[in-house]
Image: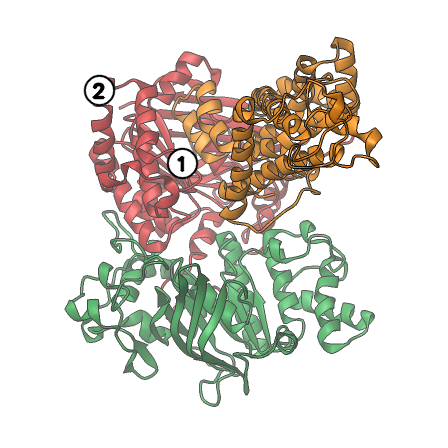
Amino acid sequence: MSMSDTAAATSRFNWLPRFGRGPFPLYAGATIIVFWVIVALLTPWIAPYDPIIQDLTQTLQPPSLAHLLGTDNFGRDVLSRIMWSSRIDLQMGIIGVVFPFMIGTIVGSLAGYFGGWVDAVFMRILDVVLAFPFLVLMLSIISILQPGLVSFYIAIALVGWVSYARLIRAQVLVLKNSDFVIAGKSLGFSHLRLMFKHILPNSITASIVFSMSDVVLVVLAGSSISYLGLGVQPPTAEWGVMIAEGQNFISAAWWMTTFPGLALVLMAFGFSLLADGLGEKLGVRE
Amino acid sequence: MPALLQVEDLKVHFPAGGLALPGAPKRLVKAVNGVSFDLARGETLGLVGESGCGKSTLGRAILHLNPITAGKVIFDGTDMSKGRSADVRKLRSAAAMIFQDPYNSLSPRRSIGDTLAEVLRVQRKIPGGKIAERVRELLTLVGLSTDLINRRPSTLSGGQCQRIGIARALAIDPQLVIADECVAALDVSIQAQIINLLIELKQRMNLSLIFIAHDLGVVRRLCDRVAVMYLGRIVETGPVEQIFRAPKHPYTAALIRAIPAIDPDQSLPQQPLGGEPPSPLHLPQGCAFHPRCPAVMEQCRHDPFPAGRQIDGRDVACHLYPTAQPSFNGQGNI
Amino acid sequence: MTAPMPARTTAGAPVLSVQDLVVSAKTPQGPRTIVDGVSFDLHQGEILGLVGESGSGKTVTCRALMRLLPATSLGIRSGSIRLMDQDITHLPEDRMCRLRGSKIGMIFQNPTSHLDPVMRIGEQIAESIRFHEGASRREAKAKAVDLLRQVGIPDPQSRVDNFPHEFSGGMRQRALIATALACNPGILVADEPTTALDVTVQAQILRLLLDLRDQRGLAMILITHDLGVVAQTCDSIAVMYGGRLAEIGPKRALLREPRHPYTARLIACQPGASAGSGPMPSIPGQPPSVNAFPSGCRFHPRCDLAIATCRQEQPPMREMSPRHLAACHRAEEVAPLRADADANRDRKAL
């Protein structure tokens, strides 16, 4: 059970790059993420141009000294827009993971620990969520609410928790029969204490590692949804939006899609390295 | 003196896993199938048997860690089988368990000082300000240096972890300790250290101890009485030396004969006891031991499980002794 | 050495000879010696018991002589292993592969994990016969049935088509023995073969191993932590401590007059060794960790005979009586701790 669940949860990331084991991926990943965080924090001061104001005299300029990464069809500086985007994309990655993580952890703990009807009810809900393709479910929830970032966060919280719940539940099922939990029970520890002080700290590492890879997925999902016009609305800069806008100019202005794409890949790369390194460091086997 | 613990006709049955045909009767694992015994204060009882005989299930059922199907567990005058939460709380503050796997029985992400302090905090038997002092006392009591207080279990040896397990059990000032195969996972030289610690502690603290083991040699050293289990029932119980010197039940005899002696002049039995314990899912008819019994008689195959009878100061459940006095505390079993 | 065994002889050339075997582990801090200078001979029909606590190096020694060490982490650094007349210390893997099973077989502690769960028992036995002897499918199956009969599986004709999960624990160990013996190896290495079994089943398996030795003249290495098992089955005993041989010799001499303090203590603290109450003899302290072997004699921190020399100098192996060697500076002063008289008297009364 635990094996197959973990495998199912991680198999979506088989295509992500994998490097040597040991601390190197951890440090490399952390460096990339720290780089993006710094960029996101400092953007208002260091971005060379405004990301939204159009300058129709400078449309579709190739990369040059004035515009290091070129300009788009409205004459906006691509570098500045990428920098501003990093703020939104990081925020999407973090908020889009924190809520599913918390919901999934609580649901998984309760279901695994108490079993019986609690487990049955949560697992049926989970089956229903899993029965729909991820993006289709996201899209329908967002379109019911209304296109925008907030709807995106709500949708990802409603859909994303299932992976965490399954991971945690599988671990809890094993751990709740382990000797140290029985020992605690025999010494009069309450259910809450056993669940959150003894079982959870030992079952959560796999979820933490998974959440790092999940950030990648969420950012990609956010970008795809923005690309489809249901997430971040133009003219706000977001990598997915930028790629979508640049698509029509791909032959005339390759820089409009290539650089946001590279930025997205670099951040995804950072998180996936971080996930690998953390997994190794925390002893999580896949 | 009244017994600290009385177990009366205790049964623990589990539904078997796996697929059952619809309409077919539900398959039950009869792990414990009618066990009765008393344990006096300060007494040590060895519970011995092969894997699957139900000895660990019995130990956990006594501590209310397994659901009980039928029968009574009376601890210090209170019937625990009703499972009232106030009663269970009382049991939790007076009875503790020591586990087989020294590493797995300690929370891996907590320091050992934390592990011990937590028990003291939850049980509220001593004021909060004295907890740190009591933790150091407990470590000293089990023969560990107080320098280890901030170490994680993974940095300790198996023997050290098992001492922590014992200290944790003693933290609640128990009247009853159930030790489930607590030396089986240790090296021989460390086993002896732990056994000696248990001998010393039970004398010093007047503990009642149920020592669950498959190793008869260990039981002989530590216990006053021994109960031999086979497939969910006690087949023979009595003072440990008497049973070792002259076992009455054919299974007990085979079990004792099978311990390899460290005597170069003695060779392995030419005809060891054949067969293996059957699955508790398909208990044989009659006496459960009859398919392996060297002294099997016709009635063993058909008659119900033999009633416990008193011979030579011990109780035996075997058709070989039809004329002996029936045991007083058995309902058809020992 | 008591009962005359026709096939057993200690004269003549040994079938297996290990000389000064050193095995080291690769660690980030450089190589670390796990097994240090182990030497012993095994003759036809002899059962050698290799005794030691966890971390003593007994399992690594046997994996080394099977050439089954994981190449990425462990390696033979020096010494030699001779199987029959062949030096196999550095034999290439493809040639070693042909020797395993046909000249030297191995059985393990946990038969369940060493049998393929999705393959019929008969096929697993036949596989090795077909590989080593090139027998036909039908011949191999007939031989598998015969082997199952020899290892005491009732109704082998139908059992041969069972899967491992249809066997009980003891029967799985019997089946594993049958696979190891399929191609008539002269040597069987048994790594804790009865540790996972119940005591009554353990007696059956040990009886089977003894019978097989008598019928086939097998030489056997029996790795165990249980001196009782060794006392009842082996002809000679090697005691390992901290990666080195502490003592080696004929069973009777070693158990009656141990010449290493560790052996003497180990015999005394076996739980079955003594009756009565009161504290058991024990060995203070912990077995040494592979990462930090003590200087000099590795037993000195736990030894009540230790003197200054023991802390500084590694004791050489000295012959104390014929073929009985001990590595102790004070071997002459070791007195056997006799506590087992009671237990044995009782057992004889049964």
**Quarter that holds the N terminus of chain B:** top left
**Label 1: which residue?**
B106
- Where does the image place residue C103, in percent across and percent down from the top left? 61, 78
With A106 as the anchor, is B208 left or right in this view?
left
Residue kind at label 2, given as amino acid type: Gly
Quadrant of the image occupied by residue C188: bottom right
Residue kind at label 1, given as amino acid type: Leu
Sort mark 2 into few (<14), some (14-19) or many (20+) by Cα contacts within 10 Å.
few
Above or below, C300 against A25 in this view is below
Would residue A169 be visible to someone looking at this image? yes
Circles 1 and 2 on the same chain: yes
Give the chain coloured green. Answer: C
> Is disc 2 placed on a helix, strand or loop?
helix
Sort mark 1 into few (<14), some (14-19) or many (20+) by Cα contacts within 10 Å.
many
Above or below, A87 against C199 in this view is above
Pinpoint the chain carrying mark 2: B
In the rendered image of the structure, the colour used to display chain B is red
Q: Nearer the viewer, residue B240 or B296?
A: B240
Above or below, A283 against C53 in this view is above
Give the chain coloured orange. Answer: A
Q: Nearer the viewer, residue C192 or B25?
A: C192
- Where does the image place residue C3, in percent across and percent down from the top left? 44, 78
Would residue C1 be visible to someone looking at this image? no
Q: Determine the residue located farthest toward the front in the rendered image.
A: A57
- Where does the image place residue C346, in percent across and percent down from the top left? 34, 57
Q: Determine the residue located farthest toward the left in the rendered image.
A: C308
**Label 2: which residue?**
B129
Closer to the camera: disc 1 or disc 2?
A: 2
Quadrant of the image occupied by residue C332: bottom left
